[in-house]
Amino acid sequence: MHWLQHLFSWVRHRLFTAEMVRFIVVGIVATAIHYGVYYLLLGPVGHNIAYTVGYAVSFVANFMLSSLFTFRVRPSVQRFAGFGLSHLLNYVIQIVLLNVFILVGIPSSWAPLPVFVVVVPLNFLLVRFALKRNYQHDGKEKTGNNHHPGIQ
């Protein structure tokens, strides 16, 4: 029974950090934006275009919220590029899963929901890596404090 207590303690202290909680809050907001745009456009333009437009709209809000609120770093061109690359990979995985779920019979209006469940943990790791890296003004990595001033 001691090992179970140790496991719960490890999960609570390692996985449920304040950063992870903020990530989840931002993720919920970004997902709501994404799904809302997708649902509104689904009839007029079809599921792939609707999904892509929803993804793009939520992307900008997600970058700003992830930078300033979740990971508390200063937004920069380099971080935006890293965020973009992480989301490009994430998008490819999502669009493949979306079409797989539709092919196996999940209605297109519901298919994004299991996609979101599958990709959230992967997205956390990719985004954290992209935003928490340290950059100098010339775009090269550096060490030191990369936090946005005034945000602790």
Image (cartoon, rainbow, N blue to C red):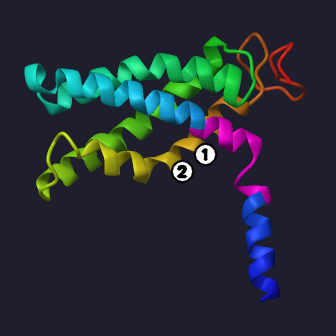
| Amino acid at circle 1 | Leu
Position in image of residue 3 (x %, y %) = 78, 84
Q: Quadrant of residue 138?
A: top right
Which residue extends farthest bottom? 1
Residue marked by disc 1: 125
Start and end of the magenta stretch? 13-24
User: Quick check: 8 left or right of 29?
Assistant: right
Mark 2 vs 1: CB contact within 8 A: yes
Residue type at the position of mark 2? Pro
From this view, report whether residue 6 is shown above or below residue 46. below
The location of residue 82, given as percent across then percent down, is 58, 27
Regarding residue 93, the answer to whether it shows in the image is: yes
- The residue drawn where x is 75% and y is 60% is 12
Sort mark 1 into few (<14), some (14-19) or many (20+) by Cα contacts within 10 Å. few
What secondary structure predominates along the stretch shown in magenta?
helix
Q: CA distance from mark 2 to mark 1?
A: 7 Å
The residue tagged 2 is 121
Residue 88: % across, % down: 42, 32
* Figure check: 95 above or below 135: below
**Quadrant occupied by the N terminus:** bottom right
Q: Position of residue 139 (x, y in %)?
A: 70, 16
